[in-house]
Every structure is written in C-alpha cells, then in structure tokens.
Image (tube, rainbow, N blue to C red):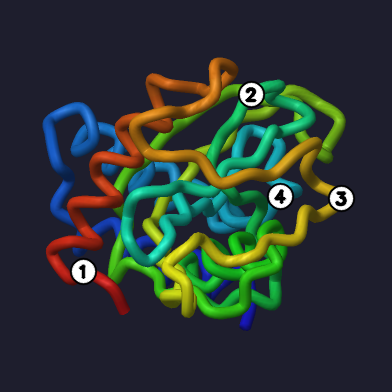
Amino acid sequence: MSIESLHASTVAALSAWSAPDAEQDSLRHTYLAFLDAAPQACARASEPGHITASAIVFDASLEHVLLTLHPRVGKWIQLGGHCEETDETIADAAVREAREESGIPDLVLSTGPVHLHTHPITCSLGVPTRHLDVRFAVVTAPTSDGSPPTIVRSDESVDLAWWPVDDLPENTDLENVSALITLGAAASRAGDLG
C-alpha cells in the first residue's frame, strides 16, 4: 500500500480501459502522459494536479443515485475524493470514498473506470490545482423492501441524498453527472462489476 502501488494501478486501469468515445480516449491518453511524467501523480501533495477517485453510487434497482452536495463545488455530484496512501489501487480509493461518504458498507464496484473528468479546483492544498478524476460505478446490495439503503452523511458533505436517475435536483452538475449515470448504469447492466 503506497503512492507507488496507486500509481501503478492507475496506469494499469487506464491502459486496459476501452473509453466510450474519442473525447474520453483523449483524456485517457492525457492521464497516462501525466502519470508518466509525475511519479507522485496520485498524491494530493502534487500541486500541478493529482489523480482523484470517485464513484456514482446506484441502488440495487439502478433507479436511484446517491449524490452529495459538495461544499467546495456547490453542486450535487458523485461521491469521491483524494487517494490515500492506505489505498492499494485506484479502485480501492473509489470504493473507500464511497463508503466513507455514504455510510454504506455493502458496495460492489465496477471492474474498471466508466468515465474520466479533469477540473480546476482549490482543494485541501489551499492553492489552485487540477483534479484528474477517475470515475467508477458502484451498486449497493438489495434491501429487504427494495428501497435504497440508509445513508449516513459525512462531515465532507453539506447534504447527501438518493435521487431518481430521471429526476435529479436542480443544482446538479448535469453535464458530468448525467454522463456518469448513463455510463455507470450501462456498465452495471452489462455485469461489469467486481
């Protein structure tokens, strides 16, 4: 468990990933070039930018998604954040973040990324940087009554709620979240879950 294993796992995951379109494939190549040039790319201390991991969390029916009202972004987005040295792989980082931010222990992660997104942000470093986010899909275990599981909001979130996939809140980062829902649901329906 180290920044080196995170780096290697991210390179492996992105090298094996078949991007859904030319734009995503271009981002995949950009991420790989960044990882090649920056051995500490997965460490939050990397000021020029760093790899982050996130997950769109679906209930077992794939009819609801769990979104967080992010305090820095100010919009409803997927769960995720910085990689930690305790994460062995980029997938481990994504599922850890999803568990920490949702309070749901029983999550099944997609076998590989479903989407990439790069965005400028002033994160915990306190200086402007760039997040190169590797996004996965996660599905919860079924509940006895078929409803989405109970959640527990972490301190990293202003709010946390389940939303129908076709009725997202007004203040959602629709451009990114909609694409992530479409790609994540497709991966989940195809059985691309670990």
Q: CA distance from mark 2 to mark 4?
A: 22 Å
Q: In the rendered structure, which disc, 2 or 4, sits on the residue that comes first in sequence? A: 4
Residue 51 against residue 75 in the figure, above or below: below
Q: In the rendered structure, which disc, 4 or 3, sits on the residue that comes first in sequence? A: 4
Give the residue number, with chain letter if any, for mark 4: 44
User: Which image quadrant: the C terminus?
Assistant: bottom left
Task: Determine the residue positioned at 63% across, 70% down.
Answer: 104
Q: Secondary structure at mark 1?
A: loop
- Say which amino acid is labelled 2: Lys
- Say which amino acid is labelled 3: Asp
Q: CA distance from mark 1 to mark 2?
A: 28 Å
Task: Determine the residue positioned at 32% across, 67% down.
Answer: 110
Point out residue 129 in the picture as x, y percentages from the top left corner.
67, 28
Q: Are marks 1 and 4 in contact (CB under 8 Å)?
A: no
Residue 160 against residue 105 in the figure, above or below: above
Q: Residues within 10 Å of mark 3 (few under 14, many from 20)?
A: few
Point out residue 66 in the picture as x, y percentages from the top left corner.
54, 48
Give the residue number, with chain letter if any, for mark 1: 192
Q: CA distance from mark 2 to mark 3?
A: 16 Å
Is 143 situated left or right of 158 in this image?
left
Task: Determine the residue positioned at 52% across, 73% down.
Answer: 92
- Say which amino acid is labelled 1: Asp
Q: Secondary structure at mark 4?
A: loop
User: Which image quadrant: the N terminus?
Assistant: bottom right
Q: In the rendered structure, which disc, 1 or 4, sits on the residue that comes first in sequence? A: 4
Give the residue number, with chain letter if any, for mark 2: 75
Residue 123 against residue 41 in the figure, above or below: above
